[in-house]
Amino acid sequence: MFFPFFAMQRYYLASAKELMRINGTTKSALANHLGESISGAITIRAFEEEDRFFDKNSDLVDKNAIPYFYNFATTEWLIQRLEIMSAAVLSFSAFLIVLLPPGTFSPGFVGMALSYGLSLNMSFVSSIRKQCTFANQIISVERVNQYMDIKSEAAEVIEENRPALDWPQIGSVEIRDLKIRYRKDGPLVLHGISCKFEGGDKIGIVGRTGSGKTTLIGALFRIVEPSGGKIIIDSLDITSIGLHDLRSRLGIIPQDPTLFQGTVRYNLDPLGQFSDQQIWEVLDKCQLLEAVQEKEQGLDSLVAEDGSNWSMGQRQLFCLGRALLRRCRILVLDEATASIDNGTDVVLQKTIRKEFKQCTVITVAHRIPTVMDCDMVLAMSDGMLSYITNIIELQ
């Protein structure tokens, strides 16, 4: 009896585990779509894309329902066969008792045996069902283990190889045969890029979407580690130092400015390294002085989550303020003007030209006017680049 039961259980689990894995994958896609739809509800309504998102949601629900239904059906398939097998064994046992000579067992003993046999079979079937349910649910633990096995980032600080406190002093950047791939077995995204920027140079990087511009910037901050080659800043290989020591010495103004829930002071100086006077001076340079002074609490004015109580242009200027406070020798503008109005763009460009005159500024842009003031422009295509020293050639 035990052998056929466990054989049936193994046969069932071979399919049920895969169905649970598929169910978890499709459920994640459905949850992501739901979260994105809720967070972007205003934009969806503005572009009248409700029907498209409803249709996509219905498709994802259908895809998730398919493995869920089959998993339910396979469970019922197992239970039905286990109960049929247990009933057959019990019936066969009762039939054998009937064939025995009269007086072999008393009627009371036979009744008790059949009663306990029925209860035992029900308990046995229930036990196997719970084992199968446990084996299916353990798939969730497997998914968690997959995340636990993901390789962590490099150390934040390498004590035996920390850069000088004033590093980088010059701001020179040299890229030697840089190769990037997102997965070990994946294709190259950047194909052996080599270039050198002197300290104080103004560099423009242009190219179509997917050409590798943002990946190159990610490699500079070691968001992605190089598969080959190296990046050297002021004669120091960036892979030889900790991530904190590297990223804290570089400035960036991203396309999507990030503000954290807290105060104006906290968003500009989260570590409390600068005085109020220095912060007010930076706000004046960013033309945010009046906007902050109008608030009753000044530097302690509230900043909502994601900076939702400030305009997109003001959030971008706050990011500029952070860079001004830290006075980094290398500043990166990653599509910084792509989502702001022309007025804010003018303020941003004017402030950068004035305050970062002696710094190395790397500008990633789609629009040619944004890089018109650069000393050198790099055009990227399919993970490769070519130098363009004359801006007229780019036009």
Image: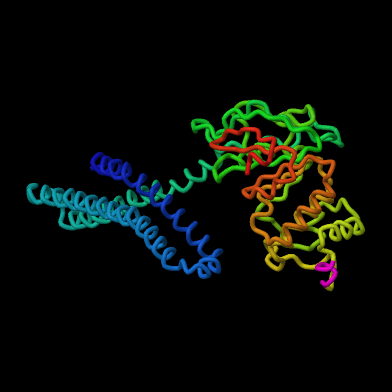
Side of 357 where 181 appears, left or right: left
Residue drawn at x 58%, y 33% as measured from the top left:
384
Residue 11 coordinates in the image, percent (x, y): 28, 41
Q: Which is more toward the observer, 80 or 227?
A: 227
Q: Is residue 194 left or right of residue 6?
A: right
With 8 as the anchor, is 220 left or right in this view? Answer: right
The answer to which image quadrant residue 237 occupies is: top right
Check the image and tell me how it is coloured: rainbow
| Foreground of the two, 305 or 281 | 281
Percent position (x, y) of residue 334?
67, 47
Q: 298 or 343: nearer the eye?
A: 343
Looking at the image, residue 114 lies above or below residue 219: below
Identify the residue at image location x=48%, y=45%: 143
Q: Is residue 393 magenta?
A: no
Residue at 56% x, 44% y: name it.
208
Q: Vertical placement of 370 versus 276: above or below?
A: above
Tell me what residue is drawn at x 74 percent, y 42 percent: 374
Q: Which of 87 and 395 lies nearest the eye of the viewer?
A: 395
- Mark count: 0
Q: Work out which quarter of the rendered image holds the N terminus and state it.
A: top left
| 49 lies above or below 151 | below
Q: What's the magenta region?
A: 290-295
State the quadrant of the C terminus: top right
